[in-house]
Image (cartoon, helix red, strand yellow):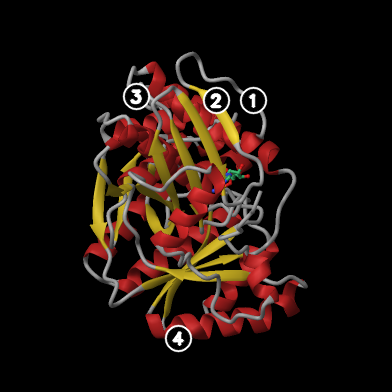
Amino acid sequence: MKQLVVSLTFSHEKALGQQVLELEMTLADSEMEKLFVDRFGTDGRSLIKVRAPGRVNLIGEHTDYNDGFVFPMALTRQTTILAKRRKDAIVRLASSMEPQMVEFSIDAPVKKEAPKWSAYPRGVAEALRLKNLLKVGMDALVFTDVPLGGGLSSSASFEVASGLALLTVNNAKLGLADLALACQWAEHHYAGVPCGIMDQYISAMGVKDHAMLLDCRDLSTRQIPLDNAQIEFLIVNSNVKHELVQGEYTARRNQCHRAVEVISRAFPTVKALRDVSMTMLEVCRMELDPVVFRRARHVITENQRTLDFAAALEAKDWTKAGQFMYASHFSLRDDYGVSCPELDALVDICGTIPGIYGARMTGGGFGGSIVVMGRHAAMADAVVAIDDQYPQRTGLQASHFVTTAGAGAQVVKDLAL
Ligand code: ADP
Ligand code: MG
């Protein structure tokens, strides 16, 4: 079976010596349709097309499991699915990234079977089946230009696009928030990743040219406009992967839990670090282990920074907003202990470029990517500085791309079924 790798990886493009980054997917509809026809051996009539973006978190790190605030933005990179309604209950799925085709039925509980990549659409199909939304299956071909495993949530974009395709071929209606929750359920129960709701929410509900302030306690959202003419974002992958991430993550969660336990003795209304002010933390300082104190300080200040960052963006005060990004990075490095020398080097390099307003690690830490905010004209300078200095300082190559805020999930083409 023909395998087309549409999504060039960071390092591959680096190898091609491209200066400014990965190519966005540029396959025309007709090319995708031809691939669909080749892959499934059917005609290309009545195809539907849906898309859902990857995401980057601009600020609000390690706040989600403390009932706090996060502030993600949808990328212009996305998962695209071409699908055709079937008359039976079979789902046949192929991916441009995978040689093997997957087949399962939605008239009984969807099986958890290999290959691993099929866990995401299987889980989403099961979540929608349990809601009695599915009657017929589909043939579907998946494309993506979100780097897989790069911390930009290719998994959530894959889930949301799969869900939207299934709903569309079934002519079924489900609100975007409920679609996101179904996708989170899939990630928990089929992919085995106990994630929060941020990734699926922003992929489903992102608004073009906006970032989304999400309250992880009550799941309320506010779309904050970003001015594309003034600011762009550079995502830089350090290409560092830390093996202890899961253990470190669990340790941080336990430390937050411990802080709440101690602080709630003095302040019984405290249910999560979200409810704690710096004054309250100081009152309890003597009873807290110094490491636990610093962990709590990060979460408390990060929640405030996230709100302040959103306010600065609304006021179009890019310089001030950028300062919150740097402060977030330093807090993650010094108080939360989740950065690494490579991420610090990247932030440091970007901090020297005129027209760059702010930079910080994004995601869980110990590797992964940084997000940089700056003027359009500064992006190329930042890339040159990174390509020049990062290998010298770390022995590694970074990879990067520029993005603005993309739109959330959409049915792009819905031909009469
Ligand atoms: P991230 O979400 O940060 O990109 P994850 O490990 O959560 O990383 O998800 C990546 C996994 O999602 C891949 O290893 C693959 O199994 C699956 N996946 C995402 N997009 C696709 C796709 N277009 N085709 C096949 N599998 C995909
Ligand atoms: Mg993921």
Query: Where is mark 2, residue-wise?
Result: 104
Circles 3 and 2, Cβ within 8 Å, touching? The answer is: no
Are discs 4 and 1 less than 8 Å apart at CB?
A: no
Q: Earlier in the sequence, mark 4 or mark 1?
A: 1
Q: Which mark is residue 354?
A: 4
The residue under label 1 is: 113
Upstream in sequence: badge 3 or badge 2: 2
* Residue pictured at 58% horizontal, 20% vertical: 111
Comes first in the chain, label 3 or label 4? 3
- Mark 3 = which residue? 269
Q: Secondary structure at mark 3?
A: loop
Residue at the spot 49% in from the left edge and 30% down from the top edge:
91
Q: Are marks 3 and 4 in contact (CB under 8 Å)?
A: no
Callouts 1 and 2 close, C-beta under 8 Å: yes
Mark 1, secondary structure of its residue: loop
Give the Cα separation between the discs numbered 3 and 2: 48 Å
Quadrant of residue 20 within the rendered picture: bottom right
> Closer to us: mark 3 or mark 4?
4
